[in-house]
Image (spheres, helix red, strand yellow):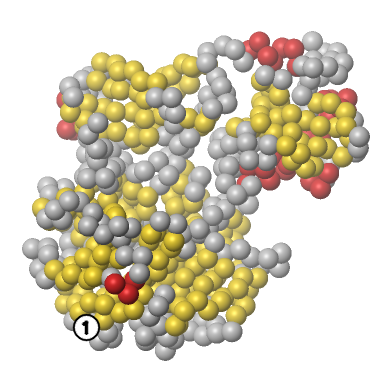
Amino acid sequence: MTSDLPPGSDSPVRDHARGCELDVLVAPRAARSRLVGLHDGRLKVQLAAPPVDGAANTALCELLSDHLQVPQGALEIARGATGRRKTVRVAGVSAAVARSRLGLAGLLLAGLAACTLEVPFAVRVVLPDDATDLNGADNLAVELGPDAWFASYPVRGTEFEVELEFEPDAVERSLALYLADGSELLAYGRSVPFVLLSPPGDLAVLMARPGVLSVYPGEVAEPDPDVLAAYAPGRGLVLLSSAGDIALLNETSFDIDLGARLSGPPEPGDGAFVADRRGRLWRAGGDEGIGAAMYDPAADRWSVATVMGDDLGARPGAAWSVGAARDRLYIAGGGTHTDLVALSLEPDDDGVIELAPVAALDGPRTGARLVNFMRGSDETLMLVGGEADAPAVYFPDGAHAFGPVGAWTNIQCIALDVAEDAEDSVRVLCLGGQRGGQPTGDALLLTCPPALANTVVEERPGFLAEPLADPRLFADDLAVYAQGAAHWWRLDRKTLVPELGETVATRVHGGHSITLGTGVTFLVGGRDLDDRAVDRWWIFAPSLAPM
């Protein structure tokens, strides 16, 4: 069919007072951005961008402006800015011209019939390297949300393939796979969200054992103990090597893509490497004054930000933490500074970001841990430890200090839950690190009510039977887990009694634990018992609460 189709009810393009309007159906987080065809009277568009903070709308306008041969300023989202079904208004282009440039001439009738067919698509399954205990599996369950479609199939160990066939629709879904021996769950995993209308051609599901550490497949070719890691929402695990190289482990396909290099290698351990709410990566430091560089994965480009503020002086040993909304980076103390400041992660058109004061501290708090957790809708900031002889816990909001006095560095903390005996109080567990310059297994249990002045800090000496000088903490609905010194401790959430598990991870100190949007946590980098760079990645999948 080659002739143009007259405007009518089946056309997604129609004339408007100053141009035309185009009805589209978008499918974000696709492998690439492209025009697909027609569905239910709309132009179907796949977008590589995630539906986060307007990124999908921006990508849609960029794609359409290229095809329609108009500047992006001629496009606006007239309706459906936050939904999948959108109407785009185009200035200066008639409906007939738009249909021609979009390749819709003659495709409007043919496209509708094809979209009613069931479409098969393959799913690549990624299993741990240490998967010999999964060979006893005899069934695989498949769950497709959000309407909880569920089916189970017999398998023999790990020798199976997954190919699904569903009628396409525009509902955002995720796929979960459960590998079991009878009723005993051996491993499971979940995909990123996608739509059946245009499923990713490279969709993969990473499966791991629940509640323990598994070995991610493949050795690290060039292990880097000082690698930095962060999660970029909608993209995956981003790694910044000590040489300045950046790599993305795509959480859709679990393929690795290399990106632009940061000019000037980052200093190990200095500052922060975090993602903002738009999925951009920030490398910030303060040893020689506050500075920051931003990496944009979509453009594959680094840019150096200009930091403006009243006090840009050096802050060696400062504590850093990204805010809950991922629009600012908190910096506490460091050097001779006795304040808490916030660095904006929203640059203006000239690449300028602001450093603004937040609160006063009781001292420089060099070497402390800056923890932020939520109490209802409120974000609470807390400093724990430090090199000076000061109370172990300090809340900048209200200048409250609690707990034992003394130097305590590298302590790690995790928010547990709402305390059963105190309404709206949050419990926080802090453990390990170096106390008085020596590795420790001591812990602190905090109960933080809405009135922080009434916080209760319980010290638990010898909480762990062996010291953890540099622990990494994991959590699920059933337990909290601490990894360090090649050990794996499990702490039941109700009793908080530590039990030494059989899982062994070679990391002793250094490295990062980063949780992806699919729920799996990666443990990357660091050094082993012989002070060599760890050459494997480890993965953790939360235990599933019994139904």
Name the residue furthest left. 465
> In the figure, 342 relative to 216: above or below?
below
| Residue at 12% over, 47% down | 502
Q: Nearer the viewer, residue 17 or 297?
A: 17
Would you say 404 lies left or right of 344 here? left
Q: Note whether residue 292 is visible.
A: yes
Instruction: Give percent across and percent down for residue 342.
Output: 51, 72
Q: Position of residue 73 (x, y in %)?
A: 81, 48
Query: On the rendered image, what quadrant is the N terminus found in?
Result: top right
Task: Report whether 469 appears left or right of 273.
Answer: left
Query: Which residue: 63% across, 46% down?
Result: 55
Q: Residues within 10 Å of mark 1 (few under 14, many from 20)?
A: some
The quarter of the picture where residue 444 lies is bottom left
Q: Secondary structure at mark 1?
A: loop
Q: Is residue 267 visible?
A: no
- The quarter in which the C terminus is drawn is top left
Q: Nearer the viewer, residue 546 or 51?
A: 546
Q: Which residue is mark 1?
A: 406
Q: Residue at x 48, y 84 (%)?
A: 314
